[in-house]
Amino acid sequence: FSALTAHYRIQDANPLSDRVVADRLPLILNVRDVHSHITGSLRAIESDMLFGMHDSSSATYRAERAEQMAAADRSLAAIVAAEKNLDLKQDKQRLDQVAEAVVQIRSLQERVVRLSESPSAENTAEAYVLLQKEILPKSDDAIATIQQVVDSQSMQAQAEFEELHKAN
């Protein structure tokens, strides 16, 4: 009788364990990666604006910015794939907002790059205003939303771990 009970408990625990380990934790890590990549792209574009007076250093910063945004895209694609296996509740809308913010941040950063390709006092001033008034606030909003998702999904993972512990 106890072997049968143990068998049923294991059957109940396996899908839950799979959901936590294969879906929920990778989702949380990918969401955190989007945060890291947004921050990395900001660091690169700021460095380009401050120190990119030489073509070689500017090219390095621009390549770094592009790679950080591409990495954010890869993390977002992994998040979309994970959404199929999880009930994200209110986090689905938040993740959609983050994905849209990444598109907007990329577009704004590309405007800054175009402005800095034709250096003039007006273009430099416009690029700086664009960074300070649009890119940084939009990035701050996206990062705050990312933190809400991480907190929410971490709480969900904790609840699933507790449920898994009870099943064992």
Image: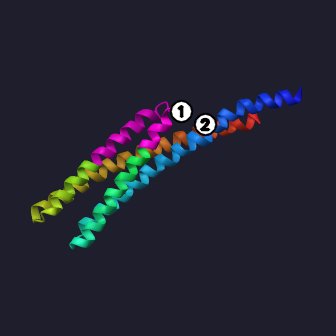
Whether residue 24 sits left or right of residue 93 in the image: it is right
Q: Secondary structure at mark 1?
A: loop
Query: Camera-side residue: 152 or 29?
Result: 29
Q: Residue at x 52, y 48 (%)?
A: 29
The magenta-colored residue range is: 77-105
Q: Which residue is mark 2?
A: 19
Q: Would residue 143 be visible to someone looking at this image?
A: no
Q: CA distance from mark 2 to mark 1?
A: 8 Å
- Residue 63 in the image: x percent, y percent? 30, 62
Of the numbered discs in the image, which one, if any, rests on residue 126? none
In this view, 161 is above or below 53: above
Asked if the residue at tag 1 contacts the one at tag 2, i.e. Cβ–Cβ closer than 8 Å, the answer is yes
Q: Is residue 91 magenta?
A: yes
- Residue 133 in the image: x percent, y percent? 24, 52
Q: Secondary structure at mark 2?
A: helix
Q: Which residue is mark 1?
A: 85
Q: Amino acid at mark 2?
A: Arg
Q: Residue at x 15, y 57 (%)?
A: 126
- Residue 111 in the image: x percent, y percent? 19, 53
- Residue 132 in the image: x percent, y percent? 25, 56
Quadrant where the N terminus sits is: top right
